[in-house]
Image (cartoon, rainbow, N blue to C red):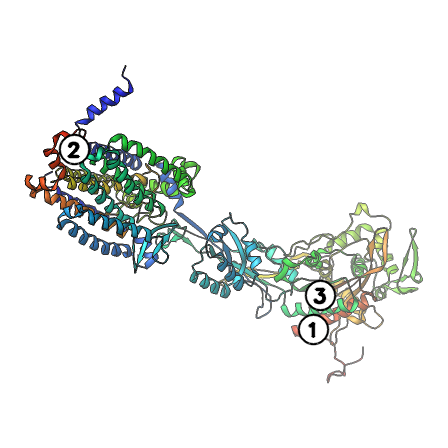
């Protein structure tokens, strides 16, 4: 695990390579029909990849401790909130199938919730680091970060984008859990949140139908169509797959084949070997990400690395869980693979931040740590107030 | 026994030393492991049903509708009587259309191009839970293609075109009863369209292959393609020109005599071909659906039976000659027009005291004919009528042909022989009368009437060519020649059929005036006026039978039906370019010897 950064780069490159080959096949029919070019989506995605690589390099090069600055955090939060609200603005916001998830900027559509992901990770990491041992306090450790998180999630929830809401709730809870919030506090508020979520779902006929069709699939064959087709794709692929470019399901049998359900096309074309392989790559991504978090030079870096890893691996897990019928259908992309610009850029930036933290592992020394990590400083100076603080040693 | 508090305390103690990151890591690993297990199950588990369903869903089969064959007339440059045109049915998915945001735009475009009111369009789309509805069927291609451009330009979803064929009858109501029509399901329902439906329909083709999730065919994965075989063309014996003469003559007669109905048939007597067959009132083939009076669709020539009256007398005479019972010179006492026989009085229209057999037919004496029939006896008359084709189908290729009513011999009373001989107590069709007349004209050979001259495939290969069929020979050629001579006298001065004469031709025929049977006897006011004959009398070419039902105020065959015969015959012989057999008055070569 010493060269976690290098391993991470190799994993991401592998995922990107497989992703682009897969996208070329899965989006060919749709691209041909919509733009007369079978590589239409691939070209579009290449442009976003270019932006993503720039973002990743940028995120990797500067010192991540900049992100710890409170003013920068406030600025990021303000920007994200404005962007999230802009999706409802006429002319600027774009509505597809009843969801206001996009902002139209010239020819590009941007999904603000993708950038909210990064903001939330940075914001919570900063807060939990600042509060340090006071995280056990119900106000400092639970109420304030939960309020900030809930405000952001509320905006995303209104779009509505339940998938991202769910994902970010998980990631946020994870950062708070690691940051030292009491487990009982988290469990209690998690239960409350879940109840609110269930209430909201029950008031939305579309989502309720999705959930019901997930549970009682035979009773709602129309609503469960996408899920059934997705599972059929895996069955058609078998162990070895039907062969590259030979997918039948991408011919409009499987809706969103190039997008949220691209993993099913991988299953059909390349079979069990490929799907397990990609799953394994995401597991490796998670392991190396957590390894970086574990060995980060300071608490902020640790939380940041943990949050970014959670973003990528939890999203991958939810996406694959949905595609395989383990979870109810949500509109979440598969990182590095699904067509979608904002998702590509935010995932690449997340990887960049992870690399940034990894870069600092080697250069860290005790001197810098004690200056930058207030908790360690506080712990060393005042051990008598450290009772109850579950501080994780890096 | 641990208290719950103790258990939590124990857990806390255990977990205290463990890093929280490790807990999260383990949970995620477990989750990924579960998904991996699910993947193995989905890929390699029991999934035959899923695979079968997917293969069924991607199967594509479409039948290609063949064009129905044409119906042509038998003239030298065939005229089209029926043809199929490629058209579109405008279909809609009301569910998709009413759910869309641009429903109103769609309705207004449809109403503008299809020339329907918006209410009508909305009415067609009223079942918003259904996935299929016809907006309008059989729309010509120029309209449907312009409509389609509008629909695609406005991004309207839920409207589509379906290939269809429309049966079109360029001549509207000409020969409507012979040609017939095709119902909405594409099945012939009258006339030749019905009887030759299988030849006209052709064979559907099929395309097999795969389709995508939008149910569109994937052209590159087509596995089977069988083109449809277009329906065969049917060429009728009918001649559009002669048909026109006939229909015109009937229309004139209907107007002139305020008749209820009228029908006529023109037959080539040497072959049995039907050159024209018309029935009035008629209907428009292109608007058959709007027709409310179903009697207009009756082909009266072969579907209506009537008492023929005097037109049947030639049969009695011909049979008597064949039996050698009488000669044309044999004299009969015609009882001064009123003969009391078997408790009933039989009357003649004009009273005569004595008439030769030749004059009995010329003057159409009922009493004389009845006496000849009584000499012959029931059995021979019945057998002879059967031999002439009465009481049975002639076998023409048209539906709903009637048998006529020839009572079985056991049911004949003492009076039957004398009445049937003069055409009462027997019912016939005009087609049977034409057959009888043609048999006399054709040296005694009774021929099967037919309307289909040939059938050819769409690329011109002949499939069937009709040939004359002899049904029987009731009389020999000597008797036939004698009958032709006697029937020709009917149209001479002093005969009943002088109005059937055609300039330049000797016409043979027989008039008929029959009272219509009503419950309990015969009507005093309703008559059937008819004329059956052929020309030229010595070298017959065409047979024509004309029947007019309930003419007013004149009602005799000689006054009502004979002129119709003459009108049809005159135009037909000129059209067929028959050589005149008699000198034409006033013509340069008219200095022929007086008869």
Decide if residue A98 is on the left or right side of residue B18.
Answer: right
What crowding class fits label 2: few (fewer than 14 Cα within 10 Å), some (14-19), or many (20 or more)?
Answer: some
Q: Which corner quadrant holds the N terminus of chain B? A: top left
Residue mark closest to the camera, 2 vs 3: 2
Residue displayed at 38% across by 48% down: B213
The residue singled out by tag 3 in the image is B543
Q: Which corner quadrant holds the C terminus of chain B? A: bottom right
SS at circle 1? helix
The subunit letter for the residue under badge 3 reads B
Q: Nearer the viewer, residue A59 or B87?
A: A59
Decide if residue B87 is on the left or right side of residue B317.
Answer: left
Q: Position of residue B30 (x, y in %)?
A: 24, 32
Q: How many marks?
A: 3
Label 1 near label 2: C-beta < 8 Å? no
Alpha carbon of mark 2 to alpha carbon of mark 1: how far?
120 Å
Which mark sits nearer the N-terminus, 3 or 1? 3
Decide if residue A46 is on the left or right side of residue B271.
Answer: left
What crowding class fits label 3: few (fewer than 14 Cα within 10 Å), some (14-19), or many (20 or more)?
Answer: many
Residue displayed at 6% across by 39% down: A366
Q: Position of residue A104 (x, y in %)?
A: 32, 57
SS at circle 2? loop
Alpha carbon of mark 3 to alpha carbon of mark 1: how far?
14 Å
The subunit letter for the residue under badge 1 reads B
Q: Nearer the viewer, residue A47 or A304?
A: A304
The residue singled out by tag 1 in the image is B571
Q: Position of residue B540 (x, y in %)?
A: 71, 68
Q: Give the number of the disc on residue A391.
A: 2
Residue mark closest to the camera, 3 vs 1: 1
SS at circle 3? strand
Decide if residue B127 is on the left or right side of residue B417.
Answer: left
Q: Position of residue B82 (x, y in %)?
A: 58, 63
Alpha carbon of mark 2 to alpha carbon of mark 3: how far?
120 Å
């Amino acid at each position: 695990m010493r060269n976690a950064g290098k391993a991470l780069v190799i994993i991401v490159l592998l995922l990107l390579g497989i992703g682009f080959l897969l996208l070329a096949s899965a989006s060919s029919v749709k691209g041909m029909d919509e733009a007369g070019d079978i590589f239409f989506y691939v070209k579009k995605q290449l442009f976003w990849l270019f932006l993503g690589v720039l973002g990743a390099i940028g995120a990797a090069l500067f010192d991540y401790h900049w992100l710890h600055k409170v003013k920068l955090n406030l600025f990021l939060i303000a920007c994200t909130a404005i962007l999230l609200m802009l999706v409802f603005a006429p002319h600027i916001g774009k509505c597809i199938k009843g969801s206001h998830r996009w902002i139209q900027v010239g020819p590009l559509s941007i999904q603000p919730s993708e950038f909210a992901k990064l903001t939330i990770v940075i914001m919570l990491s900063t807060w939990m680091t600042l509060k340090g041992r006071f995280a056990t306090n119900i106000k400092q450790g639970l109420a304030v970060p939960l309020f900030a998180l809930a405000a952001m999630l509320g905006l995303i929830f209104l779009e509505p984008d339940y998938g991202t809401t769910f994902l970010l709730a998980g990631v946020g809870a994870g950062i708070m859990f690691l940051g030292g919030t009491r487990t009982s506090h988290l469990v209690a508020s998690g239960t409350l949140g879940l109840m609110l979520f269930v209430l909201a779902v029950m008031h939305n006929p579309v989502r309720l139908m999705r959930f019901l069709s997930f549970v009682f699939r035979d009773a709602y064959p129309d609503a469960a169509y996408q899920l059934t087709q997705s599972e059929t794709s895996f069955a058609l692929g078998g162990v070895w797959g039907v062969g590259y470019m030979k997918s039948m399901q991408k011919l409009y049998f499987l809706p969103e084949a190039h997008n949220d359900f691209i993993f099913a096309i991988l299953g059909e074309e390349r079979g069990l070997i490929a799907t397990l392989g990609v799953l394994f790559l995401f597991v490796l991504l998670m392991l190396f990400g957590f390894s970086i978090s574990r060995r980060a030079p300071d608490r902020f870096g640790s939380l940041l690395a943990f949050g970014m890893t959670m973003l990528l691996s939890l999203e991958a897990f939810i996406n694959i869980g949905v595609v395989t019928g383990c979870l109810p259908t949500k509109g979440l992309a598969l990182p590095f693979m699904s067509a979608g610009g904002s998702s590509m850029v935010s995932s690449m930036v997340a990887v960049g931040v992870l690399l940034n933290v990894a870069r600092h592992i080697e250069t860290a020394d005790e001197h810098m740590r004690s200056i930058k990590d207030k908790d360690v400083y506080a712990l060393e100076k005042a051990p008598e107030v450290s009772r109850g603080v579950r501080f994780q040693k890096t | 026994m641990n208290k719950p508090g103790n258990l939590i305390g124990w857990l806390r103690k255990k977990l205290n030393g463990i890093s929280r990151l490790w807990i999260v890591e383990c949970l995620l690993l477990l989750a990924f492991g579960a998904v991996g297990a699910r993947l193995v199950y989905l890929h390699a588990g029991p999934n035959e049903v899923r695979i079968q369903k997917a293969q069924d869903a991607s199967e594509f089969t479409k039948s290609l509708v063949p064009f129905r064959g044409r119906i042509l007339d038998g003239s030298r440059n065939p005229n089209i009587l029926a043809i199929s045109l490629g058209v579109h049915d405008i279909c809609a998915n009301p569910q998709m259309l009413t759910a869309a945001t641009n429903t109103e735009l769609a309705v207004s475009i449809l109403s503008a191009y299809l020339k329907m009111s918006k209410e009508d369009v909305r009415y067609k789309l009223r079942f918003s839970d259904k996935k299929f509805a016809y907006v309008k069927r059989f729309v010509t291609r120029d309209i449907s293609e312009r409509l389609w451009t509008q629909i695609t330009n406005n991004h309207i979803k839920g409207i589509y075109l379906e290939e269809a064929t429309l049966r079109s009858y360029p001549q509207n109501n000409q020969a409507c009863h012979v040609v017939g029509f095709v119902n909405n399901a594409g099945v012939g329902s009258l006339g030749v369209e019905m009887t030759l439906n299988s030849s006209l329909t052709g064979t559907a083709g099929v395309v097999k292959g795969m389709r995508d999730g939008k149910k569109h065919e994937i052209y590159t994965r087509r596995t089977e393609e069988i083109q449809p075989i277009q329906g065969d063309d049917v060429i009728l014996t009918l001649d559009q020109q002669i048909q026109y003469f006939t229909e015109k003559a009937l229309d004139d007669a209907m107007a002139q005599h305020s008749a209820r109905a009228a029908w006529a048939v023109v037959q080539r007597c040497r072959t049995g071909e039907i050159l024209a067959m018309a029935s009035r009132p008629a209907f428009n083939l292109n608007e058959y659906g709007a027709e409310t009076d179903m009697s207009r669709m009756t082909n009266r020539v072969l579907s209506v039976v009537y008492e023929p009256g005097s037109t049947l007398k030639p049969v009695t005479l011909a049979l008597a000659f064949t039996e050698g019972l009488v000669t044309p010179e044999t004299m009969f006492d015609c009882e001064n027009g009123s003969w009391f026989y078997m408790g009933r009085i039989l009357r003649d229209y004009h009273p005569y005291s004595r008439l030769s057999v030749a004059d009995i037919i010329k003057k159409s004496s009922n009493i004389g004919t009845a006496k000849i029939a009584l000499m012959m006896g029931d059995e021979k008359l019945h057998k002879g009528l059967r031999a002439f084709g009465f009481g049975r189908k002639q076998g023409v290729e048209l539906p709903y042909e009637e048998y006529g009513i020839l009572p079985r011999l056991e049911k004949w009373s003492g009076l039957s022989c004398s009445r049937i001989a003069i055409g009462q107590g027997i019912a016939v069709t005009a087609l049977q009368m034409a057959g009888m007349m043609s048999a006399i004209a054709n040296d005694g050979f009774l021929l099967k009437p037919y309307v289909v001259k040939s059938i050819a495939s769409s690329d011109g290969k002949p499939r069937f060519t009709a040939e004359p069929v002899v049904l029987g020979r009731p009389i020999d050629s000597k008797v036939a020649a004698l009958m032709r001579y006697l029937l020709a006298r009917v149209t001479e001065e002093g005969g009943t059929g002088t109005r059937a004469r055609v300039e330049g031709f000797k016409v043979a025929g027989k008039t008929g005036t029959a009272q219509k049977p009503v419950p309990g006897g015969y009507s005093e006011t309703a008559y059937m006026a008819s004329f059956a004959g052929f020309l030229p009398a010595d070298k017959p070419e065409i047979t024509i039978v004309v029947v007019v039902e309930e003419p007013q105020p004149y009602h005799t065959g000689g006054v009502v039906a004979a002129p119709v015969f003459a009108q049809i015959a005159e135009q037909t012989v000129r059209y067929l370019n028959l050589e005149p057999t008699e000198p034409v008055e006033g013509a340069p070569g008219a200095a022929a010897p007086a008869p």
